[in-house]
Image: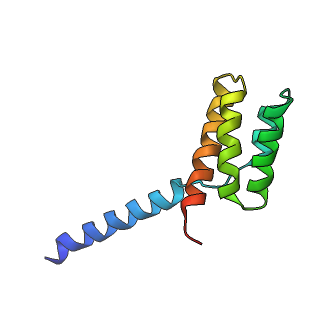
């Protein structure tokens, strides 16, 4: 019986370590700003409002402007991936209880 429990415990521990190590939920606002150097107008205002909210750890206030910016900004594939990742992380952090 002990021989079956040891591999199970080791495997469960490895799964937990991998799950914790792979969840990179930090939002790099500098990377987002660098990805959109040439936007202007309302889209820039929306993006800056969202990134300022993220910098202030106010993720709930960041979601709406990020969604609006995602529709207003013409993006290439790399920019879209960065913005979608940022939006996903902001939504996840907004949903976490404090």
- 97 or 36, nearer to the observer: 97
Q: How did the renderer colour the structure?
A: rainbow
Q: Where's residue 23, x and y in %?
A: 53, 55
Question: Relative to 31, is 6 above or below?
Answer: below
Q: Identify which residue is drawn at 18% across, 77% down.
A: 2
Name the one closer to the observer, 15 or 94: 94
Query: Which residue is at the far left?
Result: 1
Residue at horizontal 81%, vertical 36%? 34
Q: Is residue 6 left or right of residue 91?
A: left
What residue is shown at x 62% (from left), y 33% (from top)?
81
Q: Where residue 78 sits in the image (x, y, percent)?
A: 66, 28
Q: Is residue 51 above or below residue 98?
A: above
Decide if residue 59 is on the left or right side of residue 96.
right
Res. 43 image quadrant? top right
Above or below — where is 84 with respect to 57? above
Write the residue at 64% across / 30% down. 80
Q: Is residue 25 left or right of residue 61?
A: left
Quarter occupied by the N terminus: bottom left
Q: Position of residue 13 (x, y in %)?
A: 38, 67
- In the image, residue 45 lies at what x, y percent? 83, 39
């Amino acid at each position: 019986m002990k021989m079956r429990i040891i591999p199970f415990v080791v495997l469960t521990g490895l799964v937990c370590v991998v799950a914790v190590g792979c969840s990179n939920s930090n939002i790099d606002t500098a990377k987002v700003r660098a990805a959109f150097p040439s936007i202007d107008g309302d889209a820039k205002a929306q993006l800056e409002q969202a990134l300022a909210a993220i910098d202030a750890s106010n993720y709930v206030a960041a979601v709406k402007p990020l969604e609006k910016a995602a529709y207003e900004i013409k993006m290439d594939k790399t920019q879209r991936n960065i913005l979608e990742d940022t939006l996903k992380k902001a939504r996840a952090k907004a949903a976490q209880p404090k």
